[in-house]
Amino acid sequence: MDYSEKRRKTAGRPAVSQEIVDLVLRFVRENPTWGYDRIQGALVNLGHTVSDQTVGNILKQHGLEPAPERKRVEPRGRRS
């Protein structure tokens, strides 16, 4: 086999599969209040290894915004 016949590996991370992209978009449509973390958790439950940052990148590529941040409730404690 000649060196020129060998196939070179491409640099960088592998592309996200279309199946993952479709699932992320489906989760967003069906659950508009879910954020990156919750979508990522749902994908993990289905056996897919994806980071929450990847989920965010997919949403941005498709012009979608993340779910609005929830109001944080201050814990009740002693008053000074």
Image: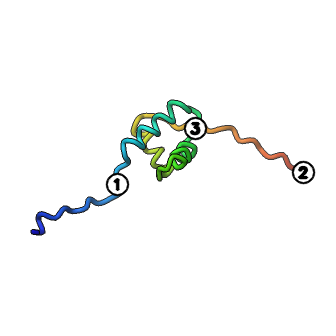
Q: Tell me the CA gap for discs 3 and 2.
A: 37 Å
- Relative to residue 61, is residue 80 depicted above or below? below
Q: Is residue 50 left or right of residue 18?
A: right
Which residue is pictured at 12% across the width and 63% down the height?
A: 5
Judged by depth in the image, the label closer to the viewer, 3 or 2, is 3
Q: Label for residue 14?
A: 1
When asked about the image quadrant of residue 25, the answer is: top left
Q: Tell me the CA gap for discs 2 and 1.
A: 55 Å
Which residue is pictured at 50% across the width and 30% down the height?
A: 29
Q: Is residue 59 left or right of residue 3?
A: right
Work out whether mark 3 precedes mark 2 in sequence or the reverse, and give the earlier one: 3
In this figure, which residue is indicated by the disc labeled 2? 80
In this figure, which residue is indicated by the disc labeled 3? 34
Q: Amino acid at mark 1?
A: Pro
Which residue is pictured at 90% across the width and 51% down the height?
A: 80
Q: Nearer the viewer, residue 69 or 34?
A: 34
Callout 1: helix, strand or loop? Answer: loop
Question: Mark 2: few, some, or many residues within 10 Å (few <14, many ≥20)?
Answer: few
Q: Is residue 78 left or right of residue 26?
A: right
Q: Position of residue 42 (x, y in %)?
A: 55, 44
Judged by depth in the image, the label closer to the viewer, 2 or 1, is 1
What quarter of the picture does the N terminus occupy?
A: bottom left
Q: Position of residue 78 (x, y in %)?
A: 89, 50
Q: Amino acid at mark 2?
A: Ser
